[in-house]
Image: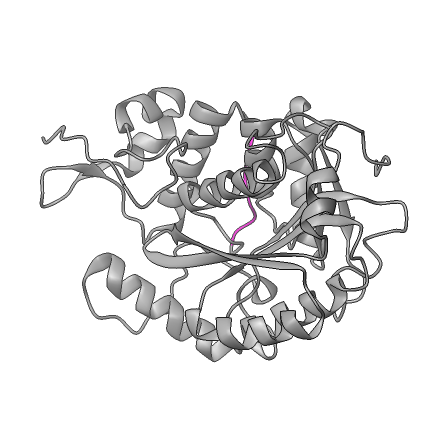
Amino acid sequence: MSKTITEKTNLHPRNLHKFRYDFELLSKNYPELKNFVGINEHQIETIDFSNPEAVKALNKALLITYYDIQNWDIPKGYLCPPIPGRADYIHNIADLLASCNNGVIPEGAVIQGLDIGVGANCIYPILGNAIYGWSFVGTDIDDVAIENCSSIIESNPKLVEAISLQQQTEARFIFKNIITPEDKFDFILCNPPFHTSQEEATKGSIRKINNLENIKTTKPILNFGGQNAELWCEGGEFRFISQMIYESAKYPMQCLWFTTLVAKQSHLKSIYKVLNKVNAASIKTIDMAQGQKTSRILAWTFLSEKQQADWSFEEPKPSVF
């Protein structure tokens, strides 16, 4: 069995998952993972990444081993995120905040993030809190997702004071009903639904399975799960992000950096036009890897360079709890 240590150079330098998974350590911390670990044709220990139960077991082991999350689960059929890629988003946001703080990453509970579409997995708030000590508000339109996040938080005492949840009661809005006049966020993050229809989401699922297993199938198994609202919306990624941008312009001074993942590079040109329409002061695109595919973070702010430099990371934000 090969023990070759290969660095994943496409991941962020601070990412704890830059090297091949240590299944011996992970299985020691979460013994159920052993049921899914095998040797592939290259004589390397791995799991079947097209098996949702295997991926969930790996996530549980990673969260226990590296992030001190002892109790984590998701309902069947909900999105089971690849943790290395999610951690990369958090690390890139840390760099973005540091760019407004003399190169120093601001840490601790006074740093407040808003996760749009937190999902049932609550993964971004969990990682952001574990790595940098940040506080979060997580929002979603799905009551099952909110209930499951609540269960995760309650069963991990360290999260109780760090993460609050708010259900979006009107699906056509993103920030309305969520951001109040008193709120101030250091950053907002989002992993938007990127397909335009259920049919497109199913085709994407089949393509993913074919890539993972190197075989041809027509069976739409979602290896990382996913409910409709997590995977697609009318108009897809472009329409969702455009709505997010137009709404963000109504809260220009209440957030330092608005950010979102953009799966399709072909959308960037049109998205930049929308950002120019709302007079964003600064726009950044940060390339990153998300699982097997390349993705990117789009970040924008309405604050001038002076306002960015004057932004206080020390003062507590108004309480959202």
Q: Which segment is the magenta one? A: 71-76
Above or below, 271 relative to 71? below
The spot of residue 197 in percent (x, y) is 53, 78
Does the segment drawn in magenta span residue 73? yes
Q: Could you say which quadrant of the image residue 160 lies in?
A: top right
Residue lying at 50% horizontally and 26% vertically, measured from the top left: 67
In-front residue for pair 234/182:
182
Residue lying at 27% horizontally and 33% vertically, measured from the top left: 19
Above or below, 203 relative to 160? below
Q: Quadrant of the C terminus?
A: top right
The spot of residue 261 in percent (x, y) is 52, 58
The spot of residue 266 in percent (x, y) is 43, 75
In-front residue for pair 290/303:
303
Asked whether residue 317 appears in the rendered view, the answer is yes
Residue lying at 18% horizontally and 30% vertically, measured from the top left: 5
For the stretch drawn in magenta, what is the main secondary structure? loop
In-front residue for pair 57/87:
87
Residue lying at 57% horizontally and 45% vertically, measured from the top left: 121
The spot of residue 95 in percent (x, y) is 52, 39
In-image side of 44 versus 142 (left or right): left
Above or below, 6 relative to 214? above
In-front residue for pair 195/89:
89
Does the segment drawn in magenta span residue 254? no
